[in-house]
Image (spheres, rainbow, N blue to C red):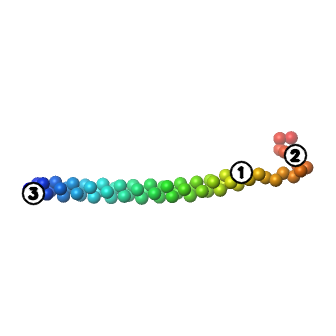
Amino acid sequence: MEERIIQLETLSALQDQTIQSLNEEIFRQQRDISKLRNRLDELEEKLQEFAQPQQIAENERPPHY
């Protein structure tokens, strides 16, 4: 009986370690996702700047002439 209790306590301790490890990994992943979202927002803003057509004066020649 005592051996069974020791096994259960050991299993419980291992599960606690696993849960803690998984929580730490989820935290790291969430932090990485937040950084990537911020970077994506920055890139989308820059893309919008490039997507806006620039005004060319009527008498100005395009650069390929």
Of labels 2 and 1, the one closer to you: 1
Q: Which mark is residue 61?
A: 2
Q: Amino acid at mark 3?
A: Glu
Q: Quadrant of the N terminus?
A: bottom left
Residue closest to the eye, 31 or 51: 51
**Which residue is label 1 attached to?**
51
The earlier-in-sequence mark between 2 and 3 is 3
Spot occupied by residue 45 in the image (x, y as percentages of width and height): 65, 56
Instruction: Point out the image quarter for the C terminus.
Output: top right
Tell me the distance, in whole angstroms, between the alpha carbons under discs 2 and 1.
21 Å
Q: Secondary structure at mark 1?
A: helix
User: Whole-percent x and y of residue 10?
Assistant: 20, 55
Residue at horizontal 71%, vertical 51%? 51
Which disc is residue 20 wearing? none
Query: How far, Cα to Cα, is label 3 from label 1?
Result: 72 Å
* Label located before the other in sequence (2 or 1): 1
Asked whether the beta carbons under mark 3 and mark 1 sit within 8 Å of each other, the answer is no
Left or right: 48, with 2 as reference point: right
Amino acid type of the residue tagged 2 in the rendering:
Arg
Question: Which residue corresponds to mark 3?
Answer: 2
Secondary structure under tag 3 reads helix
* Label 2 – label 3 distance at C-alpha: 92 Å
Which is nearer the N-term, disc 3 or disc 1?
3
Residue 36: image location, x then y, percent = 53, 54
**Residue at the right extreme of this rendering:** 59
Residue 30 shown left or right of residue 42 in the figure: left
Callout 1 amino acid: Ala
